[in-house]
Image: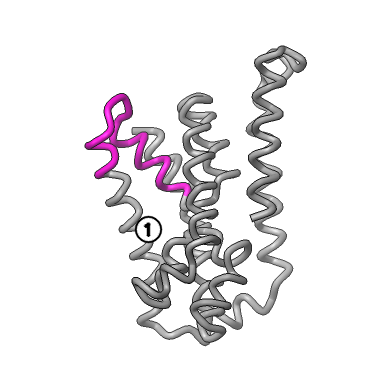
Amino acid sequence: MKGSLIIVTFFILGAVCGITEIMPAKWFEGGISFYALCALMFSVGVGIGNDPQTMRNFRSLNPRLALLPLFTILGTLAGSAVAGLVLSGRTLPECMAVGSGFAYYSLSSIFITEYKGAELGTIALLSNISREIITLLCAPLLVRWFGSLAPIASGGATTMDTTLPVIIRFSGREYTVLSIFHGFIVDFSVPFLVTFFCSL
């Protein structure tokens, strides 16, 4: 939760700097967001590579539960498609690109801003931060109403880091490995799916 609020604060500060022209737009011409994206992807790779326990955890996973990331991806894309059909002013691929962020707001918003512009990138940022915050705040209700797997599906790409503590607390410690595996697979799908839908 704290990390999400920090990200939103920096976003607001950036918007204020842009509106007041404290930091002129020409400073950010020449692909600076691309280099920021590369640095972010490098950091994700280092984080996964530095945790040898992750691969050992994957081997102990129940094969049936291993399908959960696939269903999370398909369910999110189906919901995004419905939103694309209902909302006016946004195309179906744009809505599906936003949904393909799976709560990975930093990466997806940079990609979408690069491909589709700052407006849709901002929508992606706020939408995906909202998904993470809803998971953090509503995990006990999700477990009560929909079962122990619901917070994992809701958390999307964040289930191996920021939402993992609430998942362990309300779903149970036995779902730790599944949560990490789920977050890893969904996280890995984000750059491919976002760029695919942005290119349509």
Q: Quadrant of residue 57?
A: bottom right
Q: Is residue 36 left or right of residue 101?
A: right
Q: Quadrant of the N terminus?
A: bottom right
44 over 57 or under it: above or below: above
Where are the magenta residues, as a range? 82-101
Q: Amino acid at mark 1?
A: Ile
Whether 85 is among the magenta residues is yes
When the figure is inspected, residue 45 is found, relative to residue 169, above or below; the finding is above
Residue placed at 47% from the left, 59% from the top? Answer: 156
The structure residue drawn at horizontal position 33% and vertical position 65%, both measured from the top left corner, is 71
Q: Nearer the viewer, residue 2 or 161?
A: 2
- Residue holding disc 1: 73
Residue 70 vs residue 106, the one in the foreground: 106
Q: Is residue 11 above or below residue 185?
A: above
**Where's the C terminus, which quadrant?**
top left
Residue 37 location, quadrant: top right
- Local packing at callout 1 (Cα closer than 10 Å; few below 14, some 14-19, many 20+) is many
Q: Main secondary structure of the magenta part?
A: helix
Image coordinates for residue 107, horizontal then vertical, percent: 58, 44
For residue 64, side relative to residue 118 (left or right): left
Q: Is residue 150 magenta?
A: no
The count of marks equals 1
State the image coordinates of residue 38 (x, y, percent, origin top left): 66, 42
In-image side of 38 versus 177 (left or right): right
Kindly identify the residue that appears in the image at 27 percent across and 27 percent down. Answer: 88
Way the structure is coloured = one colour
Q: x%, y% of residue 69?
A: 41, 66
Left or right: residue 138 versus residue 53 is: left
Q: Quadrant of residue 70?
A: bottom left
Q: Secondary structure at mark 1?
A: helix
The image shows residue 19 at horizontal and vertical percentages of 65, 15
